[in-house]
């Protein structure tokens, strides 16, 4: 009985971690900054590749994963300063430009590194509950997703940088007039977003086949989580991942992966139909 | 009629434009006499894609609906044609009936998807994201239909490897059907393209088109003026998506093959690149730019598909950053402005006043 319950929880936790980790960076870039970053998947791919390259150069895995996140963050900051900056008032154009970047990044990686890249063996052992056996690394991912949620909340709600960042997103002109360095805040926020994307890639690097088009497999889940979460990402992303995770895990268990994937998207369309402002809009209305 | 063709929502009017257009059409008509049938076949292949771009131009450029779903409907059209044709057979005009049936299926699919999005007030960027997600889901679904259990009637979907075995289109004619292959197919697609282009010009310059542009500029104001914004948008979405389906069905008839890679990434990016590069706000610019880009892309693909895709990405990002209206539209505007200036120079009396 307990084993069955734990098995259900394990499958839910697996999907939940995937949704949170892939959506966290996008929640900042898309949800807060309003840039529709279709190159999000490529930042995740960047995290995966850097992690694998550093790991095979001989560093221990956690250090390699940190490198993956940091490199993705730095590339993101560079991109923000050079290309994204003029596009804040033109969200649909940001979508087109980042899609162009995504095409270049995917195909460039394909040319430079070939269609496969050496992967990493999944660390950790399996543990068993009742007659089922589970991978302990998946539990690490679940814990990491909770840490990322906590980190984003503390960073944006409890630090001076967070106050400045939220003020800048809300009213850049006024924030600047009050002495906030707007350009610095934008670049750093974007870098944190892409860094979290890189972290997602770094954490999933030991569980996946490394191919240059792998970013696309994260992209849709990331976007639907943020969209269902709604405008206030700090409030909405968590509940959105819980709801979508439950739907996806249930469908996966009963009907298989394909129904899970397609059912998730149908659920998203239905949720947006009922709650146009996402979960955060609904929660705000309920509490105010 | 003529006034509608030359209306305010389209670039290119007056005698010079229509003479040039007639000349281009004449060249396109006699062109198969001078080259071998392989080149005619690949030109027909280029033309097949243009319908999809024109559909996106109508939705995005005239009504402001950024749809990533053109390859979704391309897939519905391609697979639809294949499935219906294989089950119906080619005799007694079966292939042409399949094409018509496919367009009906695409229209129904577009109407149901569009109803949920447009009547659900999924607007702006969310529209793009939802159509994007649906497109990737279809590609994902088709990719795993490899087993023999995935069939519709006699047609096997064949997963990643794609579906084949359908017959090309035939035109029912007195005294035997005409096989639309090679040069005949080229003429068929060319006539279809000219018809669709002229009809679109009529449409966007009509009262309907004016309402579409009003919705693009300010949906709330259009609604307050008494127009049912959602109904207009839904009709536009269906027309644009059916053009995507037409591209898919023609492509499937041309190569007698359709695979999930025509639906998913990076194929889904292509219509957006064509239309954004050409200038989404005008059908003529989209027509010209799309043909140029497809021809260029094909020429490059012979050497390296990756580099061709990289160039597409750079073109997309570059156009949006440097010429947000699209390259062809920007060029056309420069020409129009220069001609206007020349005219004032020719008539100095205007300046003296």
Image (cartoon, rainbow, N blue to C red):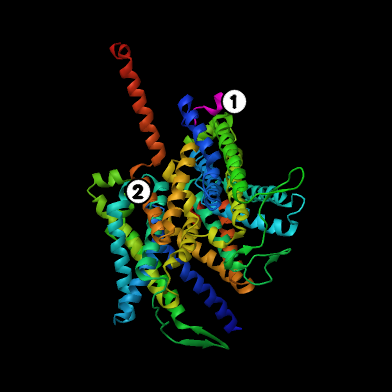
- Looking at this view, is B177 or B82 the one in front? B177
The Cα atoms of the two marked residues, 1 and 2, are separated by 38 Å
Q: From what the image shows, is residue A37 above or below residue A73?
A: above
- Extreme residue toward the left, this view: A179
- Looking at this view, is B97 or B77 the one in front? B97
Q: Is residue B135 visible?
A: yes
Residue at x 35%, y 32% (from the top left corner)? B334
Q: Residues within 10 Å of mark 2 (few under 14, many from 20)?
A: some
- Looking at this view, is A152 or B218 the one in front? B218
| Residue A243 x, y percent position in the rendering | 54, 64
Q: Quadrant of the N terminus of chain B?
A: top right
Residue on which disc 2 sits: B318
| Residue B263 x, y percent position in the rendering | 55, 58
Q: Which of marks 1 and 2 is nearer the N terminus?
A: 1
Residue stretch in magenta: B1-9
Check residue B6 for magenta coloring. Answer: yes
Q: Name the element at disc 2.
A: helix
Check whether the beta carbons of the residues at disc 1 and disc 2 lie within 8 A of each other: no
Check residue B115 for magenta coloring. Answer: no
**A166 with respect to A13 (left or right):** left
| Residue B137 x, y percent position in the rendering | 56, 61
Residue on which disc 1 sits: B1
**B36 with respect to B158 (left or right):** left
Residue at x 41%, y 83% (from the top left corner)? A123
Q: In which quarter of the image is the C terminus of chain B?
A: top left
Q: Residue B237 carries which label?
A: none
Q: Residues within 10 Å of mark 1 (few under 14, many from 20)?
A: few
Q: Can residue A186 be seen in this view?
A: no
């Amino acid at each position: 009985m307990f084993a069955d319950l734990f098995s259900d929880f394990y499958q839910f936790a697996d999907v939940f971690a995937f949704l949170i980790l892939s959506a966290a960076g996008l929640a900042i870039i898309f949800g807060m900054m309003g840039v529709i970053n279709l190159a999000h998947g490529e930042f995740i791919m960047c995290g995966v590749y850097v992690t694998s390259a550093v790991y095979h150069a001989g560093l221990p895995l956690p250090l390699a994963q940190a490198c993956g996140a940091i490199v993705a963050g730095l590339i993101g900051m560079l991109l923000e300063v050079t290309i994204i900056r003029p596009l804040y008032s033109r969200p649909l154009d940001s979508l087109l430009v980042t899609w162009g970047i995504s095409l270049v990044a995917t195909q460039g990686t394909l040319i430079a590194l070939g269609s496969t890249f050496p992967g990493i063996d999944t660390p950790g052992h399996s543990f068993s509950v009742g007659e089922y056996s589970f991978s302990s690394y998946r539990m690490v991912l679940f814990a990491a997703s909770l840490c990322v949620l906590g980190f984003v909340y503390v960073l944006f709600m409890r630090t001076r940088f967070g106050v400045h960042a939220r003020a800048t997103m809300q009213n850049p002109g006024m924030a600047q007039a009050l002495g906030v360095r707007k350009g610095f805040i934008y670049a750093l926020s974007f870098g944190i977003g892409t860094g979290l994307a890189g972290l997602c890639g770094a954490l999933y690097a030991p569980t996946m086949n490394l191919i240059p088009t792998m970013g696309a497999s994260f992209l849709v889940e990331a976007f639907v989580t943020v969209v269902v979460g709604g405008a206030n990402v700090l409030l909405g992303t968590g509940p959105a991942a819980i709801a979508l995770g439950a739907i996806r895990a249930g469908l996966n268990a009963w009907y298989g992966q394909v129904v899970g994937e397609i059912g998730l998207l149908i659920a998203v369309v239905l949720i947006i139909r009922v709650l146009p402002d996402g979960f955060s809009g609904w929660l705000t209305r309920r509490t105010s | 009629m003529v006034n509608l063709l030359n209306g305010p929502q389209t670039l290119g009017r007056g005698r010079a434009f229509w003479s040039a257009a007639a000349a281009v059409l004449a060249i396109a008509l006699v062109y198969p006499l001078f080259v071998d049938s392989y080149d005619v076949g690949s030109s027909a292949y280029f033309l097949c894609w243009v319908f999809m771009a024109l559909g996106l131009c109508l939705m995005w450029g005239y009504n402001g609906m950024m749809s990533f779903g053109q390859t979704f409907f391309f897939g519905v059209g391609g697979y639809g044609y294949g499935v219906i044709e294989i089950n119906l057979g080619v005799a007694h005009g079966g292939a042409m009936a399949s094409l018509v049936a496919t367009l009906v299926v695409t229209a129904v699919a577009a109407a149901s998807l569009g109803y949920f999005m447009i009547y659900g007030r999924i607007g702006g960027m969310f529209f793009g994201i939802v159509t994007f997600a649906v497109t990737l889901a279809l590609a994902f679904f088709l990719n795993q239909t490899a087993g023999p259990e995935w069939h519709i009637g006699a047609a096997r979907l064949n997963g990643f490897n794609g579906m084949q075995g359908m017959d090309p289109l035939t035109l029912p004619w007195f005294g035997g059907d005409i096989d639309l292959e090679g040069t005949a197919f080229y003429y068929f697609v060319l006539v279809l393209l000219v018809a669709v282009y002229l009809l679109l010009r009529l449409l966007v310059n009509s009262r309907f088109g004016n309402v579409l542009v009003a919705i693009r500029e300010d949906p709330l104001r259009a609604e307050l003026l008494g127009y049912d914004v959602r109904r207009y948008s839904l009709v536009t979405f269906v027309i644009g998506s059916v053009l995507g389906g037409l591209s898919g069905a023609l492509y499937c008839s041309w190569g007698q093959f359709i695979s999930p890679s025509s639906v998913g990434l990076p194929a889904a990016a292509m219509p957006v690149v064509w239309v954004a590069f050409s200038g989404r706000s005008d059908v003529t610019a989209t027509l010209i730019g799309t043909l140029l880009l497809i021809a260029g892309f094909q020429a490059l693909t012979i050497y390296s598909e990756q580099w061709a895709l990289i160039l597409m990405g750079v073109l997309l990002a570059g156009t949006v950053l440097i010429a947000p209206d699209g390259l062809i539209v920007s060029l056309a505007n420069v020409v129009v402005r220069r001609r206007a200036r020349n005219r004032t120079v020719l008539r100095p009396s205007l300046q003296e006043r």
